[in-house]
Image (cartoon, helix red, strand yellow):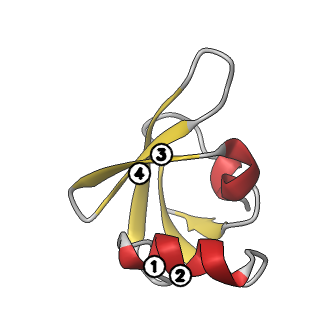
Amino acid sequence: MKLSELAVGQQANICSLKQLDTSTRKKLMVMGVLPNTLVTLIRKAPMGDPLQVRIRDVSVAIRKSTAQQIMVEAQ
């Protein structure tokens, strides 16, 4: 499933970042978005973009188009 498909409050493990382009992948990895990391969807903006996620006690805003390229496994 894709990160963008999570429901608010739902947790998942990040499985793959392979669909992202190299520069975006590197930026996210520096912020702690790594495979086998637990992520929680905190909220979606009123128009659905961006998404606020919590990764390792850090809150990160991610564009919906980027979240659609991050594969996760729901808990």
Distance from the alpha carbon under mark 1 to that under mark 4: 16 Å
Is residue 51 found left or right of 61 in the rendered image?
A: right
Residue sitting at 69 percent across and 56 percent down? 66
Q: How many residues crowd around disc 2 within 10 Å: few (fewer than 14), some, or many (20 or more)?
A: some
Residue depicted at 41% across the width and 51% down the height: 40
Task: Give the mark, 3 or 4, whose residue is nearer the N terminus.
Answer: 3
Element type at marker 2?
helix
Q: Give residue 10's mark.
A: 3
Question: Amino acid under label 2?
Answer: Lys
Please report contact status of discs 1 and 2: CB closer than 8 Å, yes or no: yes
Q: Do the residues labelled 1 and 4 touch (CB within 8 Å)?
A: no
Measure how far apart labels 3 and 4 are at the Cα level. Answer: 6 Å
Are discs 2 and 4 less than 8 Å apart at CB? no
- Look at discs 1 and 3 and give the one toward the viewer: 1
Task: Tell me how far mark 2 sits from mark 4, CA to CA.
Answer: 20 Å
Q: Can residue 16 be seen in this view?
A: no
Circle 3 — which element?
Answer: loop
55 sits to left or right of 36: left
Q: According to the image, label 2 marks what residue?
A: 26
Question: Percent x, y for residue 34?
Answer: 45, 80
* Whether label 3 touches label 4, CB < 8 Å: yes
Where is residue 74 shown, x and y percent of the image?
57, 61
Of badges 2 and 3, the one in the foreground is 2
Task: Identify which residue is drawn at 50% across, 73% down.
Answer: 27
Residue position marked by numbered label 4 in the rendering? 40
Single out the mark in the foreground, 2 or 4. Answer: 2
63 lies above or below 3? above
Amino acid type at circle 3 is: Gln
